[in-house]
Image (cartoon, helix red, strand yellow):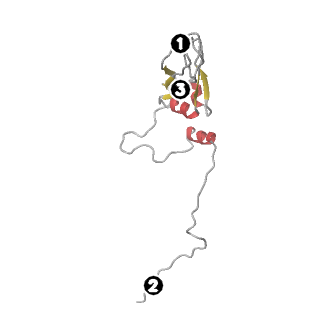
Amino acid sequence: MQAIAPTRAAYTEHIDVPMEATVSITRKAFLVQLVGGGWVLAGCGGGGYGGGSAPAPSTGAGCTATIAGNHGHTLAIPVADLNSLEAIIYNIGGTADHSHSVTFSAMDLYNLKFGYTVAVTSTMSVASATAAPHDHAIGEHCA
């Protein structure tokens, strides 16, 4: 019986040249795909840590802010804002004699929509009749 020599495919290009694949996508397009369910993230869930499913979306019961060192500030995030694909800036003046603003990124709003608590910091205020310049740590949660 005659032995048959192994055959090899002929390569017409260099195999030792590293090639890099790139994908270009805007942040907005990424968030639209992610939030809209157009992409499934492989490897999420399981892993022996229980569950693996994301929390359910907000029921529309509203959002609650915990403002550290609060002295009359209020923050109201409408549930409809949780679908925003852009950052939103809120004013937290309330009954204080000065104001602050606070920015929630599109990802912050997405996390609030799915029941996660988000921590942000307000802008620094200017000195007022009752308060020196300061900012506030804010924890936000939506049910």
Q: Relative to the observer, which residue lies in front, 41 or 124?
A: 124
User: Residue at coordinates 50% horizontally, 21% vertically from top-left?
Assistant: 65
* SS class, disc 1: loop
**Residue 97 image offset from top left, x and y in percent:** 59, 11
* SS class, disc 3: strand
**Residue 49 image offset from top left, x and y in percent:** 36, 41
- Identify the amino acid type marked 2: Ile
Q: Specify the quadrant of the image occupied by residue 52.
A: top left
Instruction: Measure the alpha-carbon separation of dots 2 and 1.
Output: 88 Å
On the image, numbered disc 1 is attached to which residue? 72
- Identify the amino acid type marked 3: Thr
User: Residue at coordinates 52% horizontally, 45% vertically from top-left?
Assistant: 40
Could you tell me which quadrant the N terminus lies in? Answer: bottom left
| Residue 61 appearing in the image | no
* SS class, disc 2: loop
**Residue furthest toward the bottom?**
1
User: Residue at coordinates 64% horizontally, 43% vertically from top-left?
Assistant: 26
Mark identifier at residue 4: 2
On the image, numbered disc 3 is attached to which residue? 121
CB contact under 8 Å: marks 2 and 3: no
Pointer 1 or 3: first along the chain: 1
CB contact under 8 Å: marks 2 and 1: no
Dot 1 crowding, Cα within 10 Å, few <14, some 14–19, many 20+ = some
- Asked if 15 appears above or below 56 in the picture, the reply is below
Q: Nearer the viewer, mark 2 or mark 1?
A: 1
